[in-house]
Amino acid sequence: MADNYISLTKDDSSQAQQLPILSGTLGPSVIDIRALYAQTGHFTYDPGFTSTASCSSKITFIDGDAGILLYRGYPIEQLAEKCDFPEVCYLLLNGELPNGAQMQEFVTLTSQHVMVHEQLTRFYSGFRRDAHPMAVLVGVVGALSAFYHDVMDITRKEDRYLSAIRLIAKMPSIVAMCHKYSTGMPFIYPKRKLGYVENFMRMMHGDPCDDYQANPVLARALDRILILHADHEQNASTSTVRLAGSSGANPYACVAAGIACLWGAAHGGANEAVLNMLEEIGDVSRIGEYVAKAKDKNDPFRLMGFGHRVYKNYDPRARLMRQTCHEVLDELNLHDDRLFKLAMELERIALEDPYFIEKKLYPNVDFYSGIVLRALGIPTEMFTAIFALARSVGWIAQWDEMIADPELKIGRPRQLYRGVAMRDVKPVFAR
C-alpha cells in the first residue's frame, strides 16, 4: 500500500498524474513508477540505475552516508566479531541467526555436499594452465547445472534451498581447484571434519605429502573477509544474478553470470588493483609523487582502494579489515615487508591529508583485503575468485528471494533511443 502520492504535471497539461510513494523499513522512500508509461507515455531515464530501486528485498541494507551495512538487520561489525561465515550463510538464507541445534544441522547438511562430481574435475583440463582463475570459475560453476538437474524446479522452495546448500558447500572446492590447476599441483579433496575456512585453506595450500594445519589467526582473518563480502545489496553482480534469474534460468547459470560481472576491474577486481598499484609505486619514497598525481585533475592516475561509490563516510567493513590486517601482520611479523610498509604509509597519509579527508577518500575494504590476502599466501590473480566464493551466498539468497517474490517479472529495462529515424532500404546499386 502507498504511504502517500506525488503529483506529476506536464507544463502543457492541467491534469496531474498521481504516483504512489512507498516506504521501506529503513532508507529513503521510493516513487512507484510502474504505471508511469501507461499514464503519461513517458519512461524515466537513469543510466546506471543509481536512482532506481529494481526490487524490494529483506536481505541487506546500506546507508552510505552514515557508513552502515546490515545483513538481515544485524550490523556487519557485530557479525564479523561474533559469528563465523557459516552462521552468516545461514542468516542470509533463512533470515535469522541459527541456534546451536540449527547450526549443527546446517553444518552437517553442507558437509554432505562438499565434494564435486569427479567428471566435473575433468573440466579443468580443458583450460590452459595460465588461464585467469575467474575464466575457469565462470565455466565450472555454470557447468554445475549439467550435474544437478535433479532439483531444478525453481518453483519449489526445497529445490532452491538444496541448490543453495550445494553451491555454498562446493564453492571452496571449486575455487581451490582453480588455484591448484594453475600451479600444476594435484587437487586436494575436502575433509568434512574441518571447518569451512580451515578446509578451504587446506585445499588451497596443502599437498598430498603433508598434513596442512591452518594458523588460527590467519583462518579467522579469511573468515572475516568472507563475512564482509557475503552480500552488498543490489550491486552490479547481484543485479546481474537477479536479471538472469528473472528469465527462469537455473541458479548455477545465474551465479555464473554474477561471477562474470564480478570479474570486472571496477567491481570485484578492486583489491587486485590495489596490489598492482602498490607494485607500481614500488617504494615509500615515491608515495608523495603518486599522491600528487592522484590530486592532479589532469592526471588519469587514481589511488585504488580509496573512496567508495556507495559509502560517503568510512566504509564500515574497512574498520574491521584494518584491524584484521594488523592482526595478520603481527602474527606473521611482516611489518618490515616492502609492500606492507608502503601500504601502511599510504594509509597514514590518506587518513591525515586534508585533501583526502575533505573528499572523504578513506581507505575502503578493498585496500585492506588485498593486503591481507597477499599475507595469507593467496596469489593476486586469485583475489577476485575469493571474492566470488564469499559473495556466492549473497547471490543465491538474493536469487531465492526474487523467485519467491509474487511481483517477479522478467527484467526488461527501457532506453532513450537516439539513433537514426526510420528510413527506407535502397537497392545496393543506389547506395
Image (tube, rainbow, N blue to C red):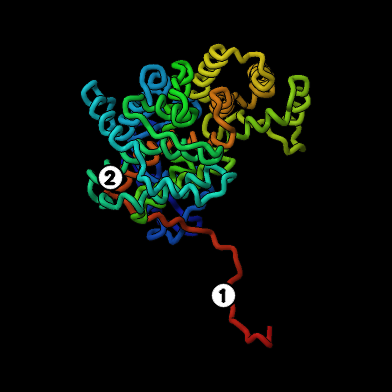
In the rendered image, residue 95, in percent from the top left (x then y), is placed at: 28, 32
Please give the name of the residue rendered at 75% of the width and 28% of the height, measured from the top-left corner.
290
Number of numbered callouts drawn: 2
Name the quadrant of the C terminus: bottom right
Neighbour tally class for label 2: few under 14, some 14-19, many 20 plus, Cα within 10 Å: many
26 sits left or right of 319 in the view: left
Q: Amino acid at mark 1?
A: Met
Please give the name of the residue rendered at 38% of the width and 59% of the height, measured from the top-left corner.
39
Q: Earlier in the sequence, mark 1 or mark 2?
A: 2
Tag 1 residue = 422
Tag 2 residue = 160
Residue 150 appearing in the image: yes
Nearer to me, 96 or 393: 393
Neighbour tally class for label 1: few under 14, some 14-19, many 20 plus, Cα within 10 Å: few
Residue 276 image label: none
Residue 313 appearing in the image: no
Nearer to me, 36 or 148: 148
In the rendered image, residue 424, in percent from the top left (x then y), is placed at: 59, 81
Please give the name of the residue rendered at 46% of the width and 24% of the height, measured from the top-left corner.
210
Quadrant position of residue 284: top right
Q: Amino acid at mark 2?
A: Arg
